[in-house]
Image: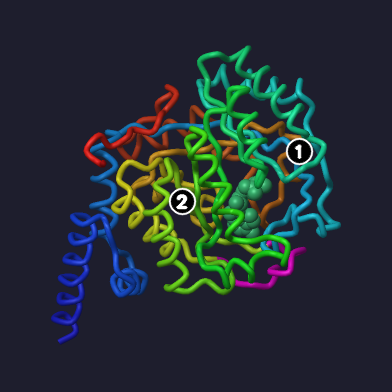
Amino acid sequence: MLQIQNCSREVTAISIVDKIETTQNISVEQLQQLLAGQENAYLKKRAAAAARRIYGRSIYIRGLIEFTNYCQNDCFYCGIRRSNQETERYRLTEDEILACCLEGYRLGYRTFVLQGGEDAYFTDDRVCRLISSIKKKFGDCAVTLSIGEKSRASYERYFSAGADRYLLRHETADMKHYQKLHPAEMSLSRRRECLYSLKELGFQVGAGFMVGSPGQTADTLFADLKFLRELQPHMVGIGPFIPQHATPFGREKAGSCEQTLTLLSIVRLLLPHALLPATTALGTLLPKGREAGILAGANVLMPNLSPRSVRRKYTLYDHKLYSGEESAQYTAALKRSIDAIGYEIVTDIGDFKPDINVG
Ligand code: SAH
């Protein structure tokens, strides 16, 4: 009896996955069913196959430079929020940032992701200078910014200075949930506006969300997927929520890795061309999390290029990895572990492959 039940559940899962893949769409009921699934092996298999059809067995790498942990925002989940008195603050100088790029360049990185809190010290002038300096020294590299919400005019200046890409996770596309995760002065409409501006200005844009953030439900996740289908970002960052002890969510439960993988796979089927990182947060919670991410449809890794001395201070969440294969210095070891699952780290610029068939 049990066997028959299991078997029929599997048949349902297969037909759901096939439907999502052919229509590149999903219903809230289908999402609920997949989130309830234990391993979703078929879903992962189809998602990895979809990624291979477009990107082959190539895995792109981006060097992450966490250049400031000062932040004027107070997001309830984030360890570098301004109210966190425990975090020791730092910012890197331009020379230090360029030294990170040089180290990354030598290791084969051709994309640098400058990520930081919303730090008023980094005025538009300073950010633009930084972008130009990097572009001048490393002309064959892409510069990605991840420095939060700015005015359209600022984004325009960054783009003119040479920035190519911008990561700004939407965090959740449900208004009430957004308010639960952020203080009153932040709003989902402003986030959305930023993302649309970035896209209109010509950036390759990354959106995304945490899995298992407090208050998240199948309905809010469905809203995320709907929003992603509407925005059509070039990249989608999805990682589990992990509590940071000195934040208001310090005692909340971490998100589930299985659900993170399920959502990665679903997003791969909904947006087959998207660049999907297997995130550090996933690698933090799950041994071999990066490999699991790739086998569920991810095709990007973002090892850390920040100087060792500051790495432990960029405390978005507790137990964040900072000395193993997640760091760029271990790129050779990383290559071997990606090789071992039948994929290959490539060091070209790793651009989004647009779908010429989509109107
Ligand atoms: N200031 C930048 C960078 C924020 S940190 C910006 O606003 O985009 C980058 C991402 O880390 C965030 O977008 C968030 O999704 C994720 N993050 C923050 N705190 C986290 C936590 N406790 N667990 C998991 N991911 C977290």
Q: Position of residue 28 (x, y in %)?
A: 34, 72
Drawn side of residue 215 relative to residue 83, left or right? left
For the residues labelled 1 and 2, the Cα–Cα distance comes to 24 Å
Q: Which comes before the other along the chain, label 1 or label 2?
A: 2
Q: Residue at x 28, y 47 (%)?
A: 48
**SS class, disc 1:** helix
Q: Residue at x 59, y 71 (%)?
A: 214
Q: Quadrant of residue 247?
A: bottom right
Drawn side of residue 298 relative to residue 198, left or right? left
Q: Residues within 10 Å of mark 1 (few under 14, many from 20)?
A: some
**SS class, disc 2:** helix
Above or below for 326 versus 210: above
Q: Residue at x 53, y 47 (%)?
A: 195
Q: What secondary structure do most residues of the magenta stretch adopt?
A: loop
Is there any visible trace of residue 161 in the rendered image? yes
Of residues 70 and 104, the one drawn nearer to the viewer in this rendering: 70
Drawn side of residue 248 relative to residue 223, left or right? right
Report the residue marked by disc 1.
Answer: 310
Q: Quadrant of the C terminus?
A: top left
- Give the residues in magenta: 244-254
Above or below for 317 versus 163: below
Drawn side of residue 110 relative to residue 309, left or right? left
Report the residue marked by disc 2.
Answer: 289
Q: Residues within 10 Å of mark 2 (few under 14, many from 20)?
A: some
Query: Is 253 within the magenta?
Result: yes
Of residues 12 and 2, the one drawn nearer to the viewer in this rendering: 12
Q: Position of residue 220 (x, y in %)?
A: 47, 70
Q: Quadrant of the N terminus?
A: bottom left
